[in-house]
C-alpha cells in the first residue's frame, strides 16, 4: 500500500483569485486523477481537499470542499478509460442525488451507492459543502466475488447497513494508518474490502457466505485490535467493554482473538509491555520512576509488571533503562 497522498487547495499560491484556484484544481485533477467536470458554490470561497491511498489494486479516497456537483461525460470516459466500480459514500449532512447512464438514485447521509467508472454519471449535492469518499475497485476483482455487479449499481445502500458501517471504519483505519508493506497483508486487506462491498450491496447465497466469513470477521477483528491499541493504558479495559463499544457479544470478541492466535488479555499485556519498553528507552521519560511508567501504561500491580517484563524481555525494567 502506498502512503497517503494529499491534494489540497491549501497548497495553491496565495496570489490566485477564486476563479484561478478553481481552474487550477480542475486542471490538476484531470491530469493526475481523472477526467471530470466540477461545479463550485458561488457564495463562498473555493476550497477542496483529497486524501487517497492504495491497497493492492484498490484505491481509497476521501474528498471535502465547496463543490456542489461533479459530472463525467462520454468525452471524459474516452480520456481516462477508468476501468472499475466506484463505491460512493456520502459523509455530508444532506442527501446526494445522482444519475448513472439511465438510472437515477439518491444517497442519504451516511449511505452509499455502487456505480461504474466506465459510464457517464452526475452527482449533485445542492449548495452544501462536498464530503464524500470513493472506493475504486477493478471490475474483475469485484466480479470474482459477485457475478451480478451490473444489477447492484445505482441502488442506494442505507447508512444503517451493518456491512457498510464496518467498511467505512475499516477503510478509514487503513487510510490513516501506516503503509501496508507486505504484499500478502495488502492482498488480505483488499480482499476484506471486496467482501464488505459485496455484503453491503446485497450479496446472496454462496457469495454472501464467503464474503461474510472473510470480510465481516476480518473487519471486526481489526476493530477489536484498534480498540485495544487505543485503550490498553486504561487499567479497566476489558473484553466486555470493547464488545459493548462495537455492538457484539463478549464471546464473539474472544472467539475472533483466539482465531488470531492470541487472547484478549495477551494482546493487552503485550501492548502495555511494548509501551513500557519504548518509554524506558526514551530520554523524555528519564525523570519518571519505573513504577510511574508502569502505571501510566495500564499496570496496577508492580510485582506482576516486573515478572511480566522480565519474562518478555529477559531482563528487569531497571536493566532495560
Image (cartoon, rainbow, N blue to C red):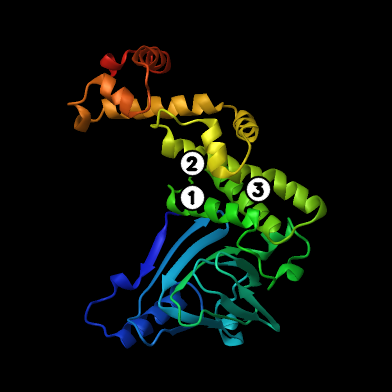
What residue is shown at x 55% (from left), y 77% (from top)? 80
Q: Earlier in the sequence, mark 1 or mark 2?
A: 1
x, y percent for residue 250: 61, 33
Contact between labelled residues 2 and 1, with CB atoms less than 8 Å apart: yes
Residue at numbered disc 1: 173
Label 1: which secondary element: helix
Residue 232 lies left or right of residue 161; in this view the side is left
Residue 15 lies left or right of residue 161; in this view the side is left
Residue placed furthest toward the right:
205
Residue placed furthest toward the left:
287
The quadrant in which the C terminus is found is top left
Checking the image for residue 226, the label placed there is 2
Cα distance between the residues tagged 3 and 1: 15 Å
Q: Quadrant of residue 124?
A: bottom right
Q: Is residue 275 above or below residue 4?
A: above
Label 3: which secondary element: helix
Amino acid at each position: 500500500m502506498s502512503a497517503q497522498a494529499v491534494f489540497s487547495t491549501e497548497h495553491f499560491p496565495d496570489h490566485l483569485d477564486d476563479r484561478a484556484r478553481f481552474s487550477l484544481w480542475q486542471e490538476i485533477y484531470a491530469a493526475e486523477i481523472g477526467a471530470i467536470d466540477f461545479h463550485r458554490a458561488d457564495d463562498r470561497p473555493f476550497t477542496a481537499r483529497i486524501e487517497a491511498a492504495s491497497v493492492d489494486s484498490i484505491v481509497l479516497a476521501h474528498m471535502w470542499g465547496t463543490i456542489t456537483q461533479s459530472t463525467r461525460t462520454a468525452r471524459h470516459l474516452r480520456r481516462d478509460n477508468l476501468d472499475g466500480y466506484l463505491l460512493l459514500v456520502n459523509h455530508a449532512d444532506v442527501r446526494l442525488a445522482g444519475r448513472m447512464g439511465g438510472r437515477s438514485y439518491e444517497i442519504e447521509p451516511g449511505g452509499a451507492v455502487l456505480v461504474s467508472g466506465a459510464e457517464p454519471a452526475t452527482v449533485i449535492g445542492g449548495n452544501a459543502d462536498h464530503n464524500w469518499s470513493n472506493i475504486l475497485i477493478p471490475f474483475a476483482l469485484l466480479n470474482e466475488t459477485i457475478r451480478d455487479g451490473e444489477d447492484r449499481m445505482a441502488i442506494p445502500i442505507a447508512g444503517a447497513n451493518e456491512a457498510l458501517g464496518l467498511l467505512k471504519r475499516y477503510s478509514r483505519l487503513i487510510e490513516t494508518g501506516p503503509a501496508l508493506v507486505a504484499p500478502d497483508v495488502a492482498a488480505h486487506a483488499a480482499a476484506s474490502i471486496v467482501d464488505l462491498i459485496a455484503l453491503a450491496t446485497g450479496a446472496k447465497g454462496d457469495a454472501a457466505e464467503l464474503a461474510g466469513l472473510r470480510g465481516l470477521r476480518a473487519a471486526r477483528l481489526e476493530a477489536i485490535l484498534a480498540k485495544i491499541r487505543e485503550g490498553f493504558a486504561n487499567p479497566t479495559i476489558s473484553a466486555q467493554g470493547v464488545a459493548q463499544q462495537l455492538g457484539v457479544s463478549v464471546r464473539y470478541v474472544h472467539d475472533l482473538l483466539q482465531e488470531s492466535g492470541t487472547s484478549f488479555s495477551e494482546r493487552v499485556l503485550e501492548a502495555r509491555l511494548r509501551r513500557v519498553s519504548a518509554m524506558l528507552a526514551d530520554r523524555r521519560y528519564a525523570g519518571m520512576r519505573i513504577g510511574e511508567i508502569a502505571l501510566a501504561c495500564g499496570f496496577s500491580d508492580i510485582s506482576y509488571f516486573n515478572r511480566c517484563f522480565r519474562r518478555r524481555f529477559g531482563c528487569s525494567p531497571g536493566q532495560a533503562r
